[in-house]
Image (spheres, rainbow, N blue to C red):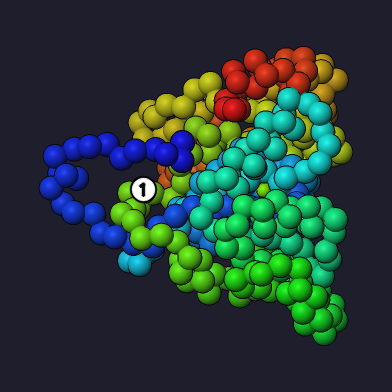
Amino acid sequence: MIDQELPESPETAATPQPVLRCGFVAIVGRPNVGKSTLLNALLDRKVSIVSPKPQTTRHRILGIRSSEESQIIFVDTPGLHAGGKRAMNRHMNRAAVMSLNDADVNLLVIEGPRWLDEDQRILDQLVARGRPIILAVNKVDKITPRERLLPFIEELARKAQFVEIIPMSGLKRSNIESLPGLIAKHLPLSPPHFPLDQVTDRSPQFQASEIVREKLTLRLHQELPYGLTVEIERFAEEDGRLLINAVIWVERAGQKAIVIGHGGEQLKEVGRSARIEMSELFGRSVHLELWVKVKENWSDSEAALRQLGYES
Ligand code: GDP
Ligand code: MG
């Protein structure tokens, strides 16, 4: 996917491509530190779903930011995490590690003012790859008193040769403006890899399925979000409206009842909020139908994962 080639057409051959600072930036860090929130803030558009629950991001998602000087291809990754033996966990770790291998620059995100063993393990992996590392100390809006920040940053500076350490808040969009410029300095010169108006590599169908999964993840408690996935069965345009049918796959009959909720209320609310967000994203009205179906242990079956679109 990362090696996606632009179609050769007579026009593209005739017009020389501009040469920009252009490359891949892996956004890495342990689950829940705010990687997807930061990506969305940098792109000024939601390309990656967000929730307070760890392991919300399951796929490698590209978010592309182009300007006259640079094309930065951010790679949002599932958090690298230890443990978890199911096929789904293996898939997520694979996606995260592959992004590290491809990256020209690594953006390591941590949640200040804490440095955990898990942060150290990820830093060790990055240092071993030898690419420039920018350290984003995120969620500084939560740090009180603010005086704790400076000594923490001094302590971080001793952990590795970071090209930059930037305190920021992705949620509040504070102190993120300088980031693209700092990153671009470390990217190779090359023609753009993607058309300049493209913001993500993901299809509208994928984005629709992720929006439904985000709304479910936000409403459901405990472990249930990890046992479900969303498949788009129909995505059609009719009279200027989008008709979208989605199946919510769960692993057990009991989970189906929880997703649907008392009198169908839960599913109705999920559908309502997903539909509103899809209408905004796609810029037209959306008719959304949701079904809940059971496929036992899909998250531990490589075959089921492939069938549901979790590429390896
Ligand atoms: P990821 O797992 O690293 O991708 O983290 P997410 O982007 O999904 O965010 C996890 C949670 O942290 C969500 O509830 C976000 O709203 C919250 N969050 C992200 N960035 C910030 C931030 O800068 N400040 C605060 N206070 N919360 C944040
Ligand atoms: Mg994420």
Name the side, left or right, on which 290 lies relative to 103.
Answer: right
Query: Measured along the vertical axis of the image, is residue 140 above or below residue 71?
Result: below
Asked whether residue 84 appears in the rendered view, the answer is: yes
Secondary structure found at label 1: loop
**Could you say which quadrant of the image residue 179 lies in?**
bottom right
- Give the residue furthest to the bottom: 147
Of 173 and 162, nearer the camera is 162
Task: Report x, y in % for residue 228.
Answer: 73, 28
**Could you say which quadrant of the image residue 66 lies in?**
bottom left
Q: Residue at x 83, y 64 (%)?
A: 115
Of 264 and 279, nearer the camera is 279
Name the side, left or right, on which 56 lies relative to 311.
Answer: right
Q: Amino acid at mark 1?
A: Phe
User: Does the closest atom of ligand 2 sit within 8 Å of the Cβ of label 1?
Assistant: no
State the residue position of label 1.
194
Q: Residue at x 60, y 47 (%)?
A: 100
Asked whether residue 294 appears in the rendered view, the answer is: no
Task: Report x, y in % for residue 174.
Answer: 63, 73
Query: Measured along the vertical axis of the image, is residue 253 above or below residue 7?
Result: above
State the quadrant of the C terminus: top right
What is the number of callouts on the image? 1
Label 1 environment density (alpha carbons within 10 Å; few <14, some 14–19, many ≥20): some
Task: Report x, y in % for residue 299.
Answer: 74, 23
Task: Report x, y in % for residue 157.
Answer: 73, 74
Q: Residue at x 49, y 32 (%)?
A: 205
Of 226 and 18, nearer the camera is 18
Query: Measured along the vertical axis of the image, is residue 40 above or below residue 48?
Result: below
